[in-house]
Image (cartoon, rainbow, N blue to C red):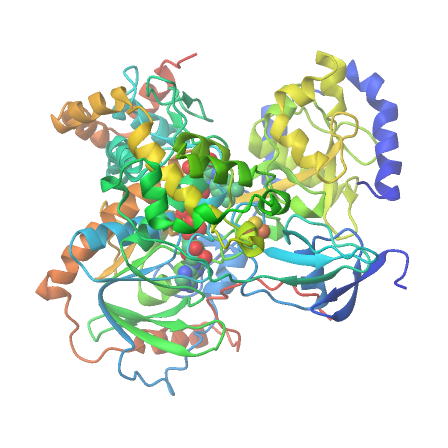
Amino acid sequence: MYTPEMKASIELVGRSRNRRLKETFPRLTPDEKQKLLKDFHPDHRPDTLRELKVGKSAGQRVPHELADVLELKSHLDPDTFVLGSPDYEVDVLVIGGGGAGASAALMAQESGASVLLVTKLRLGDANTMMAQGGIQAADKANDSPVIHYLDVMGGGGYFNKPDLVKALVFDAPFVIRWLEDLGCMFSKLPDGTMETIHGGGTSRKRMHFARDYTGAEIMRTLRDEVRNRGIEVIEFSPAIELLLDEEGKCAGAVLLNLETNEKSIVRSRSTVLATGGFGRLHVAGFPTTNHYGATADGLVMAYRAGANLIYLDATQFHPTGVAYPEQILGQLVTEKVRGLGAQLVNAEGEQFVYPLETRDAVSAAIIRECVERKKGFTTITGQPGVWLDSPMIDLIHGKGTVERELPAMYRQYKRFGIDMSQEPILIYPTLHYQNGGVEIDDEGRTAVPNLFVAGETSGGVHGKNRLMGNSLLDILVFGRRAGVAAAANAKDGRSAPSGKVGIEHVRAYHRELEKAGIITDRVSPILLPDYTRRR
Amino acid sequence: MASENSINIFVMGKKYEVPKGLTIMKAMEYAGYKFIRGAGCRGGFCGACSTVYRVPGDYRIKVGLACQTVAEEGMYLTQIPFYPANKATYDVENEKAALGTLLKYYPELSRCVGCNTCTKVCPQELKVMDYVNAAMRGDIAKVADLSFDCIMCGLCASRCPAEIVQYNVAILARRLYARHMAPRAKHLEERLEEMKAGKFDSQLDEMTRLDTAKLKELYNARDIEP
Ligand SMILES: Cc1cc2nc3c(=O)[nH]c(=O)nc-3n(C[C@H](O)[C@H](O)[C@H](O)COP(=O)(O)OP(=O)(O)OC[C@H]3O[C@@H](n4cnc5c(N)ncnc54)[C@H](O)[C@@H]3O)c2cc1C
Ligand code: FES
C-alpha cells in the first residue's frame, strides 16, 4: 500500500501519462552516454573505487566498501593467539554452505576424503537458494560447448581466463546429468527434453530451469544429499581466519560460534573456500539482491593469506530493483516491464531516459535523477527511487496484459496491496553479483598451497561481466572440481604442514596496515551486516 | 499509543515503537535486534524466518515469514529459529519411487488426521494437506508437483498434531520422482557420448589459444537462435 506522500507523486505520474504515451524520450548520443556512465555509473565513477594499500594486489582498484573490509584487522590478535590442540582434524575443510560448498563437500567425500563443512548461517542460506532464472549448458543438437565458450567470452568483455571458461563449458552437460541423477526436478517436456530458453547474451536457448525456483531446487537437493551422506556440517560457525604453516601453506581455519562466541580450531590438509559474494557490503550504497551473509568473508581471509584478487573493479548492477515496498527492497523487476512499454519517470511525472538504453546507462540515468537532480522519490526508510509506469502497459496492449504477461510480478506486488496494472512501481538499481574475486586455476587452486576457492568468491571465469545462468553453472563446475582436487591434495604427502602452524601471516598483514598508516580497531571478516538502528 | 507514523509491536513480550510499513524482520532490526538465526535470504526463498504472532482482538495464532510480512499495530510475536524435525537419510539412487519408500522412512505419514492446519499456515499457499494425502496414496508425481514451491520453512510441521514433517516427505518424493519417474533427457545423453568421445576437444583447445581480436570477430559473426 502506498503512503499519502507517494500517492501525491503517483497523481503527478498519472496526470502526465496520456501526454507521455505519445512521447518518445530521445536516445543518448554516444558522447552523452560516455559522460553519463563516467559521472554516475558506480563502476565507472572514479569515486566508487580506490587502490588497495596493502597486500599482494596493492595498487588494484576495488570498491571502497570492499577495500574498507580488506583493510581491517583480524578478529585474532597474533600476540595473544595461542593455537591449542585442534577441535577437528579432517582431510578437507569446506567453508561455505551454498551450492559451491555443498558440491565440493559431496565430491571430496566421494573421492575418499574425510570432510567437514562449516557455514555461517544454515546450510543453504545462500545466494544459490535465490536464483530463479536458470542454469546454462550446451546440451542440445544445435548448440555446442564451443558456441557456449564464445558467448561467455563476449559477455565477459574477453577478460575471462580461457582455461576456466573451457572447464565451465566442458563440464556443463556433465553437471546437468549429475543433478538429474541426484533427483533435481528440471522442467522437461513430456518426452524428457529439457525446456530451455534464452538469457541475456546467449546465442542458443541453453538456459535450463526448474520452474521459477532453479537455484532453490538445486540447493535443497544438494543439501538433502549432504545430509544423507552423513557429511558433518556445523552451522552458525563461520571461519574467521585461515591457518598457515611456516611455508605459507594452508593448514585449516579458526571458526567462531556465533551463538556462544567460542572459537574452535580445524586442522585440514586441504581447505575449500566457497563463501559466496559481497552484495551485503552495499557497494556505493546500493540495495542488493543477495542473501544476508554475502559479506566478502572469503575475499578477506584468502587475501590475508596471500591469494591474488582479480576483476573486483567490475560489479554487476541491475537497473530495476524494487525500491518499495520495503519488504522486497532490492529484488529484481524483470526487464520485460520496460519491454512492454512502461516508461521511467521521476517524482514529478516526467521522463528522463529512454527506457531501453543498455542496462548500465539506464542504471546511471536513474542514479543521476535521484542523486544529482534530486527528482527521485525518497521513501520513509530513506530509499530513493523513480517510477516505472507500469499502468501504461494495459493502455498500450489492452486490459489484462500485465496480469497475463507478468503474473509472478503482478502477484508479488498484489501481496503488498499494490496493483501494478493501475499504479506505477518504485524502482532503483540493485547490486546483484560480484564479477571478480580470488584468482584460481581450473581445479580451484589459488596462489596459497592447499587452499582452493570455488563459486562467486572466485574471479576470472566470467571476466568483467557474468551472463545470467553461468553462475549456477560455475559454482557446480568449480565446486565439484575443487572437491575432487582437494581430496587428492589431502592424500599427497606434500600437503602436510611444515613447521609451526598459526597466524603469522596475520601479524605480517597487520604490520603492513600499520606501515600504510591504517590505524584501526575494527575487525573483518564482518560476518553479518548491521541493520540495527544507529542510536 | 504510538505516534502517527509508528506502531507498537511486542517482541517476545517486550514493547517497541517502530515505523509503520516495515517487515517484521526490519521492525525487529529497527528495535535493535541483530539477527543471527532467523534471517537467511531476506527475500522469501529460504524459510529461515518463520514467525508466530497474534494481533489484538484475535485469539488465533498466526504465522508468516518475517521477511515478507508487514508488522502491524499491537503485533505480539516471536520467531521459531529452529525446529527439531525428523529427517530420514536414504540413498535416492537405490530406492523405488513407491508408497513403500515413503512409509519406510516416514511411517508417521499414516497418522494424518486431516485437520488441514498445514495448508492454512503455509506462507507459500501450497495445498500441503493435499500433497500429504497424495503421499498416503503413493501418488509421488502429485506430491512432487504440489510441493514444488516449498521453501522448507517448517511452519506446517510445527503445527501438525500428527507430527508429520511434511516438507521432508515432500523432498523425498520430489527426488524420487525426478530420479526414477521423470523421463530422461535424450539429447543430454547424446551430448555426453559425444563429449566422452572427445568430439569438441580440439576445437575447444583451439578457442583457448585465440587472441581477443579473433574472438571478437567470431563473436560478432555468430548466428543467434531466434
Ligand atoms: C536473487 C538472485 C538471483 C540469481 N539468479 C541467478 C540465475 O538465474 N542464474 C545464475 O546462474 N545465477 C543467478 N544468481 C547468482 C548465483 O545464484 C550465485 O552467484 C551463486 O549461487 C553463488 O553460489 P556460491 O555457492 O558461490 O555462494 P552462496 O550460494 O552465496 O553460498 C555461500 C555460503 O557461504 C556462507 N558463508 C559466507 N561467509 C562465510 C564464512 N565466513 N564462513 C563460513 N561460511 C560463510 C554463506 O552464508 C553461504 O551459505 C542469482 C543471485 C541472486 C542473489
Ligand atoms: S529470510 Fe529467507 S524466507 Fe525470510
- Which image quarter: residue A166? top left
How far from the left and from the top, in percent, is residue A195?
A: 40, 22
Against A283, residue A25 (above or below) is above
Q: Quadrant of the C terminus of chain A?
A: bottom right
Q: Is residue A505 left or right of residue B35?
A: left
- Which image quarter: residue B53? bottom right
Q: Quadrant of the N terminus of chain A?
A: top right
Q: Is residue A49 left or right of residue A28?
A: left
Question: Number of callouts in the render?
Answer: 0
How far from the left and from the top, in percent, is residue A193?
A: 33, 19
Name the residue furthest left: A493
Name the residue furthest bottom: A80
How far from the left and from the top, in percent, is residue A58?
A: 39, 60
Against A396, residue A275 (above or below) is below
Q: Residue at x 82, y 21 (%)?
A: A17
Against B178, residue A450 (above or below) is below
How far from the left and from the top, in percent, is residue A258?
A: 48, 71
- A371 or A434, which lies in front? A434
- A507 or A235, which lies in front? A235
Q: Residue at x 32, y 41 (%)?
A: B100
Regarding residue A156, the answer to whether it shows in the image is no
Regarding residue B141, the answer to whether it shows in the image is yes
Q: Is residue A522 left or right of residue B220?
A: right
